[in-house]
């Protein structure tokens, strides 16, 4: 039996599908559905039952369920959330409680961290444990992710569990995220509505408009690496999970227009003043640590991923995995 938290969300629901495809149907899904149409992400999925996060803790403590693995993808993911107490409770402390139970019962525990822990990138993007205490996350969400990473490392938990720092994830089943959805999703809808897309101008020397870079990673690749860790219980620690290959927003736009077989039409607009100080111009996962444990997974190229997302999902009547 495998527990998946955040199972109705973006990454969680695609992970459930990947588990199903791998023959895993003995699943307990953990999430709250709310009013954002997240329930659509769970259609056609095979699982035992759906419970809330509070119910998961209660059932674990009461020995009502005995999972062999817990894939903790769920979190409060709004990077604009200002309530640091709320993000601490839902992200840091909840993760700590579930991880503590898993370690005590020798249950495989894999959790979602975030590349946002690197802040503005002044210290680079290495997942070396010695670097983590120095990092300066820039919002309450990032702080909550950093805080658990730091605790896990300091307390020695990272030798028994797996943390994965997701970089810029995009792909099917993100539709309920609205403003928090990926640039690909927003750009696709802009092109359908106006024929073109808007990208931020550069306000930093050395970067052209649209020349800002991100490590864009496809959600299917994220899930495949999680399955790799399930199959390799000897591999533990906190790891970056990106492609290791930063690409520009101009590259991303070109891939989107190519997938749509449409002539590029890009307008550059000023980056909003409130975001300029914290806006990142470069992110790229250092995969040295991931490769050192034998994970030789080959990530999809940006062009391959965007084409699969657009042609295989966004242009379909049913865009869900």
Image: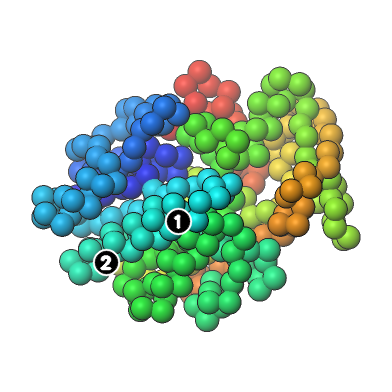
Q: Secondary structure at mark 2?
A: helix
Give the image location of residue 44, x and y in percent: 32, 28
**Residue 18 versus residue 233 in the image, above or below:** above
**Residue 128 versus residue 208 in the image, above or below:** below
Q: Which residue is mark 1?
A: 85
CA gap, disc 2 and disc 1: 21 Å
Circle 1 packing at 10 Å, graded few (<14), some (14-19), many (20+), is: few
The reply to whether residue 165 is visible in this rendering is: no
Give the image location of residue 69, x and y in percent: 25, 57
Say which of marks 2 and 1 sits in front. 1
- The C terminus appears in which quarter of the rendering? top left
In front here: 279 or 173?
279
Q: Is residue 16 left or right of residue 299?
A: left
Q: Earlier in the sequence, mark 2 or mark 1?
A: 1
Residue at the far left: name it. Answer: 63
In front here: 223 or 31?
31
Q: Secondary structure at mark 1?
A: helix
Q: Which residue is mark 2?
A: 100
Please give the name of the residue rendered at 77% of the width and 22% of the height, measured from the top-left corner. 195
Residue 104 - label:
none
Please give the name of the residue rendered at 59% of the width and 64% of the height, measured from the top-left corner. 137
Q: Is residue 257 left or right of residue 87?
A: right
Which image quadrant for residue 171? Answer: top right
Circle 2 packing at 10 Å, graded few (<14), some (14-19), many (20+), is: some
Please give the name of the residue rendered at 39% of the width and 56% of the height, measured from the top-left corner. 89
Q: Is residue 188 left or right of residue 87?
A: right
The reply to whether residue 5 is visible in this rendering is: yes
Give the image location of residue 236, x and y in percent: 37, 71
Give the image location of residue 46, x and y in percent: 26, 34
């Amino acid at each position: 039996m495998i527990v998946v938290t955040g199972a109705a969300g973006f990454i969680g629901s695609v992970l459930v599908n990947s588990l199903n495809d791998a023959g895993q149907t003995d699943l307990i899904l953990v999430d709250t559905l709310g009013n954002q149409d997240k329930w659509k992400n769970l259609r056609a999925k095979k699982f035992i039952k759906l419970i809330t996060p509070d119910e998961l803790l209660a059932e674990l403590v009461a020995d009502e369920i005995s999972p062999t693995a817990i894939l903790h993808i769920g979190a409060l993911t709004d990077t604009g959330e200002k309530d640091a107490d709320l993000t601490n409770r839902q992200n840091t402390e909840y993760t700590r409680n579930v991880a503590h139970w898993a370690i005590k019962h020798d249950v495989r525990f894999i959790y979602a961290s975030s590349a946002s822990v690197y802040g503005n990138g002044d210290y680079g993007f290495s997942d070396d444990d010695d670097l983590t205490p120095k990092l300066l996350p820039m919002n309450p969400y990032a702080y909550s992710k950093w805080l658990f990473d730091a605790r896990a490392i300091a307390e020695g938990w990272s030798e028994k569990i797996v943390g994965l720092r997701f970089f810029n994830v995009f792909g099917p089943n993100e539709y309920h995220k609205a403003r928090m959805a990926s640039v690909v999703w927003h750009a696709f809808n802009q092109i359908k509505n106006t024929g073109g897309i808007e990208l931020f101008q550069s306000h930093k020397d050395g970067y052209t408009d649209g020349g800002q870079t991100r490590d864009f990673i496809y959600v299917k690749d994220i899930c495949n690496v999680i399955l790799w860790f399930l199959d390799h219980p000897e591999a533990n620690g906190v790891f970056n999970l990106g492609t290791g290959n930063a690409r520009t927003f101009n590259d991303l736009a070109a891939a989107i227009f190519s997938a749509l077989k449409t002539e590029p039409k890009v307008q550059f607009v000023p980056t909003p003043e409130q975001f300029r100080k914290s806006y990142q111009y470069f992110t790229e996962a250092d995969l040295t640590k991931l490769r050192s444990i034998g994970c030789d997974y080959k990530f999809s190229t940006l062009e391959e991923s965007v084409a699969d997302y657009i042609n295989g999902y966004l242009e379909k009547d049913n865009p869900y995995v």
